[in-house]
Amino acid sequence: RETLLKVEHLSKHFIVKKGFGKENVQTIKAVDDVSFEVKKGETFGIVGESGCGKSTTGRTILRLLEPTSGNVIFDGENIAALNTKEMRSKRRDMQIVFQDPFASLNPRMKVYNIIEEPLINFGIKDSTERMKRVYEVAEHVGLSKAQLDRLPHEFSGGQRQRIGIARALVSRPKLIIADEPVSALDVSIQSQVLNLMRSLQKEMDLTYIFISHDLNVVNHFCDRIGVMYLGKMVEIADKDELFKNPMHPYAKALFSALPKSHPLQKKERIVLQGDVPSPANPPSGCMFHTRCFECIDKCKTDIPVLKAINNQHRVSCHLYAE
Ligand code: SF4
Ligand code: MG
């Protein structure tokens, strides 16, 4: 499979002022030296606890947040180097679906106009053409023409997420970054929305980055997965391989939290000691060493890098050799 997106050494650091003066400036490395690839037509999952940098990674790829450093090669072009105007036109090819369908839709706009708006922003002046596209995408996501005349509050959570998806798809993007797209929905509705996303992927030739903290959802939906901890990508593998054989100690603990009844849960639960350290004051060496149950001496001083163990598994940990 061809590569659609290549993220190289991407970082997003926030400078936070505490009081006055230069001494009181703190750098928060929300995303730090993250690299991964996404192939055409696949679903790449990003998992990790809240605050690990998943959403910031997604937003920085789209340049809804400006990267501090690194490259984002999309369809052969480094979009991290584009100016604002060039980026704006690029964004029709890469769209985001947000977690909260209640907050992300303008409550005073009719659904038709909500879906149409990106087309206006992308400069499609012909209103007949826009209408054709809105109707087409509405049909894809299962919204009737009569429903397009209503306001968002008249819809249930699952239907609102359909509207959010239609809005993201109306510009015919190649890549969708879905940031916890079903975690605000009832469990009974989640699979409907996921099934819709899956059939849209086939029909419209889409590539997904799927950000989630829910391992069950990720297990059903993703082809490959990257695990993040404190702004770093610590492990990347095919989904089945990662669920069966997590290598990074953090990933071992994360995947051990699947319920005992889960078909992929074989091992004992690993309960991590301590809290996630503050990203404003991260540990030296390996970010995970303060909580790692397999820590060795060099972990406190040397920063591990992501290395390939085999052609479908990469891990960032001193316990493994290339
Ligand atoms: Fe644990 Fe060391 Fe591996 Fe970090 S590098 S995960 S501290 S063993
Ligand atoms: Mg998030």
Image (tube, rainbow, N blue to C red):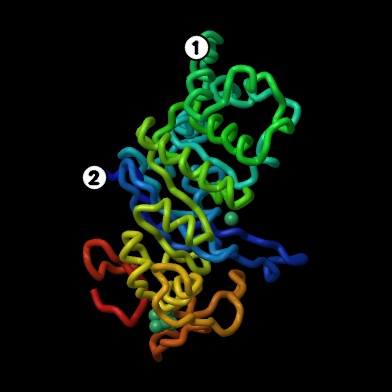
Count neighbours of disc 1 (C-alpha within 10 A) and say few if under 14, some if 14 to 19, many if 20 or more.
Answer: few
Location of residue 185 with respect to 14 vertically, above or below:
above
The residue positioned 56% from the left and 30% from the top of the image is 167
Q: Is mark 1 within 8 Å of ligand 2?
A: no
Q: Quadrant of residue 82?
A: top left
Mark 1 residue element: helix
Residue 302 seen in this snapshot: no
Q: Is mark 2 within 8 Å of ligand 2?
A: no
Residue located beneath label 1 in the image: 129
Where residue 22 appears, as percent x and y from the top left, is: 68, 66
Query: Disc 2 marks which amino acid?
Result: Arg
The image quadrant in which ligand 2 is located: bottom right
Count neighbours of disc 2 (C-alpha within 10 A) and say few if under 14, some if 14 to 19, many if 20 or more.
Answer: few
Location of residue 87 with respect to 19 vertically, above or below:
above
Work out whether residue 95 or residue 200 is closer to the camera in this orientation and state it: 200
Q: Quadrant of residue 143?
A: top right
The residue positioned 73% from the left and 30% from the top of the image is 154
Looking at the rendered image, the quarter that the C terminus falls into is bottom left
Label 2 and label 1: CA atoms lie apart by: 33 Å
The residue positioned 49% from the left and 37% from the top of the image is 95
Query: Disc 1 marks which amino acid?
Result: Glu
Work out whether residue 192 or residue 178 is closer to the camera in this orientation and state it: 192
Residue located beneath label 2 in the image: 1
Where residue 124 appears, as percent x and y from the top left, is: 51, 16
Would you say 176 lies left or right of 105 here?
left
The residue positioned 49% from the left and 11% from the top of the image is 129
Residue 179 numbered mark, or none: none
Looking at the rendered image, the quarter that the N terminus falls into is top left
Q: Residue furthest front?
A: 261
**Which tag, 2 or 1, sits closer to the chain's start?**
2
